[in-house]
Every structure is written in structure tokens, then in C-alpha cells.
Image (cartoon, rainbow, N blue to C red):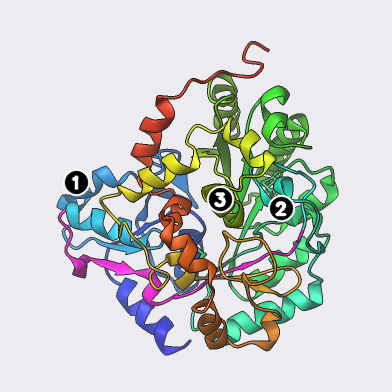
Amino acid sequence: MNARQAELIAQLSGTPVLIWGARMTGLGLIRFCRTHNIAILGFVDSDPAFSGKQIAGLPCHHPSVLPDLRMRDPGLKIIVAASTKEEEINSKLLEFGFSSSDFISYSRYCDLFYTVDVMGTCNLKCLSCAHGATEEKFPRGLMKLETYRHVIDKIVAENDLVTHISLYSWGEPFLNPALPEMVAYLHQHDIAAALSSNLSIKNEALLHKVMQQDPEYLKVSLSGFYPEAYSDTHNGGDVYLVRSNLLRLRHYINKYRLHTVVDVNYHLYNNNNGKNLERMRELCNELGFFLSTTYALVMPLERVIEKLEGRASPTTRVLEEKLLVNIEEGITAAATSNHQPTTYTADNCPFMTNQTIINWDLSVPICCTTFNRGPNIVANDFLKVSKAEIFANKQQASICGTCVRHGLPAYNLGLNRSRWETVAASKPSFDLAADA
Ligand code: SF4
Ligand code: SF4
């Protein structure tokens, strides 16, 4: 155990603690706490999908009940474990009457969160994604297991504390046949595994093997219950296959008594937020999975900048007709947040400061929002460049000035959700195949 880990253990021991952040960062921290016999009371999360539910065997509270919880337990401490929204949460805690000595920033101990994109391609071509927006002009491939092990070894060697690693960025990880071994390798290092999939995956044997490794977090991204709505935006996917795989997940979780948190992330468009959403919510409730909603965005960052600078591609124009919150509206909504700096600079952009992405070919992009090769790559080979050099190179990336000037860090964080909801509610919606 190193000094930083010992300090964190001392901070969390012998005091009632809640973790704010019930997704992968919080789940990684729970794994660490359990390894070190630290009792945690539960989670706090503002996502209504999680509030009032059990996560990893612990209760998850909505932030609004924090004052009551504190009245019952005056020594209550909160550790904020949310990789990109820490400042917003800290502001809310101050509003709830906590003083800064009552909450702990997890990023003080775990200052960099890693994503390893083990698969550089996808079987779908969603309209909102780089895979659906661009011709196949960049190389696509997969990370080999041996290379992956070197990557994980380097991450562990360069950091005092690593509690979770995400194995996806722009690719579909369930296309990599070594995924079960990759999850197992993280667990050998006592690191939690976070996965994300479209689940339109025909490889039942691989799904089974991955689940047997008990990954801590599995996000399933989709955009409809009926094929008409789903396939309109998850181009090339099969929602019947997705739904049958959701049943398989429940079967594996029951059979092997797994702890995996399945987080169904429903992308909201103007053609899928009525009956489609209702039926998917019913299915998730039956299966005991979380369903969270997110407004579909235009991705990647390069494409957003093109649009803002008057060079929107035909696919971007088609996509924008389906969005509930368009780019300009999203930028305005995010910029009016009370809880976060309304103008980020590259120096305080959380995508810059607390994350490192490693692509399947070992190149390192400036952040997770960019996709193109070329100047947005800050290191060509992660294994040959130190953590400090990567950070220094990031600070030279020219795209950050453009991104900040357009207000895109806050937009990509989706800040000020209530404002996005107001904008979305003012838009006409219909529901494809609502009467199916
Ligand atoms: S499933 Fe995900 S990674 Fe694949 S094309 Fe769609 S949004 Fe992109
Ligand atoms: S490109 Fe934008 S979001 Fe990414 S690190 Fe730079 S400023 Fe942040």
C-alpha cells in the first residue's frame, strides 16, 4: 500500500461515509473499500434511475434527502466520486449546508481516470456517432490481449490509485474476443471493470464468458423498444436481439449471483420518447436493471465544430431534425448552470485534466469527445510516452481553444439538465410504432 492509499483509508475509516456517484467511479471506490474492510453507508446520486434503489448491495439516496440524513448522523461525510461533475456536486453540497471539511474529493487521491478502447470499430453506424458520421477513413482494429496487459501494467505503475478502468470509448468491446480475459486481468489488479455495449451482439458465448467475470458496470445504449424507432437511430442494430440479450444478462446474473450493475442508457430523440420509452422502462423494471435517459447529442467534437462553423455534413443535418435539444440550445442550456464555471478554459476542462483515453492502436487522443486522428492525437504510442509527457502534450492541443470558445466542454458534460428538459418539452414529439 502506498502513502496516498493509506491516507484515503484513514479518511474513510471510523466515520459514516456516503459515496456521491453510483456509476463506475463510485463502483470502483466501493471495490477498493471492500478490499480494505471500510464500511460505507451507501450512495448518493441525482439520477432518478438510481435514487431509492440498491446498488452493489447498498442503498442509493437522492441528494434532496441529504439534510435529513445529516440530521440523523451529524458526523456524516460525503466522498465525491464523479469523474467529470465534481465541481457541480461540491456546489450542491455547500447549498445543502455541508462545509468543505465534510466532503472529500476522490480526485485528490485518484487524479486520472483511464479508458482503454479495446475495440476500434463498431457493428452499428448510429447517426449520432462518429461511426455513422464519417466514411471509414481512419484505421479500425482491435487491441490484442498481450498489448492490453502492457497498457494496464503501465497505468498501474504510473498511478498511486486506480480503482476502475473503462474498456470502451468509440468501439464496441463485445467484438473483441479477448474481452473476458481483459476483465479478468483488471480484477487480478483489484480494479473494477466498466463496459458499455449496444448489446446488438450475436455472440452469445462471448457474452456468457464476459458475464462470468462479473464486471462491475455494464452500460447498454439503445434508442427504442420497437424496431421502427430503435433502428432509425441505432443504424444496423436489431432491437429484438438487444432485448433477448437483456434477458440473457438477467439469466447470467441470477445463475452466477453476479454483482454487475446494468445501466440501460436510453438516448432520447423526438421519435422515441413516448410508448417506446415506457415499454423499455417496463422491461428494465421487470429485469431489475436501471434505466437512465440522456438527450442524444451530435458526436464527435470535430463534427460539432464543423456545424458551428457552417460546415454541417448531410448526416449532421439529418440527425439534427431528430434531436430534442439541438447543438446551439444545448450549449446555451449548459452555459447557464449555477453549479459550474460557465466558461471553461482548457486548463480547468475536466475532460483535459482527469481523463486519459488509450485507443485500440495505442494512440492517445486529447479527450474522449474527439475521434479524428491527426492533430487531436497527443501521443502515438501510450506505451512509449510518460504520464507527464501526455499531460504536457494535451496542453498544446489546438482544438481546445476552439472547443472552449464555443462553450463545448459544458455542452459535452450535459450540465444543467433541468434546462435541457425545458427545451425538450417545448419540442413536438411523436413515437415510431407507438401502437405496435
Ligand atoms: S453503438 Fe455506440 S459505438 Fe456503435 S455506432 Fe452506435 S453510438 Fe457508435
Ligand atoms: S477538446 Fe474540449 S472537451 Fe476536450 S479537453 Fe480540450 S477543451 Fe476539453
Q: Secondary structure at mark 1?
A: helix
In the picture of the structure, the residue carrying the numbered disc 3 is 304
Check contact, mark 1 vs mark 3: CB within 8 A.
no
Q: Secondary structure at mark 2?
A: helix
Q: Amino acid at mark 1?
A: Asp
Earlier sequence position, callout 3 versus callout 2: 2
Q: Mark 2, residues whose alpha carbon is within 10 Å: few (<14), some, or many (≥20)? A: many
Q: Is residue 415 above or below residue 383?
A: above
Place of residue 277 in the rendered image (x, y in percent of width and height, measured from the top left) = 56, 26
Residue 392, magenta (yes or no): no
Residue lying at 60% horizontally and 80% vertically, measured from the top left = 155
Earlier sequence position, callout 1 versus callout 3: 1
State whether label 3 is within 8 Å of ligand 2: no
Check contact, mark 2 vs mark 1: CB within 8 A.
no
The circle drawn on residue 228 is: none
Q: Secondary structure at mark 3?
A: helix
Residue 375 seen from this side:
yes
In the picture of the structure, the residue carrying the numbered disc 1 is 68
- Magenta highlight range: 96-120
Residue lying at 59% horizontally and 87% vertically, measured from the top left = 157
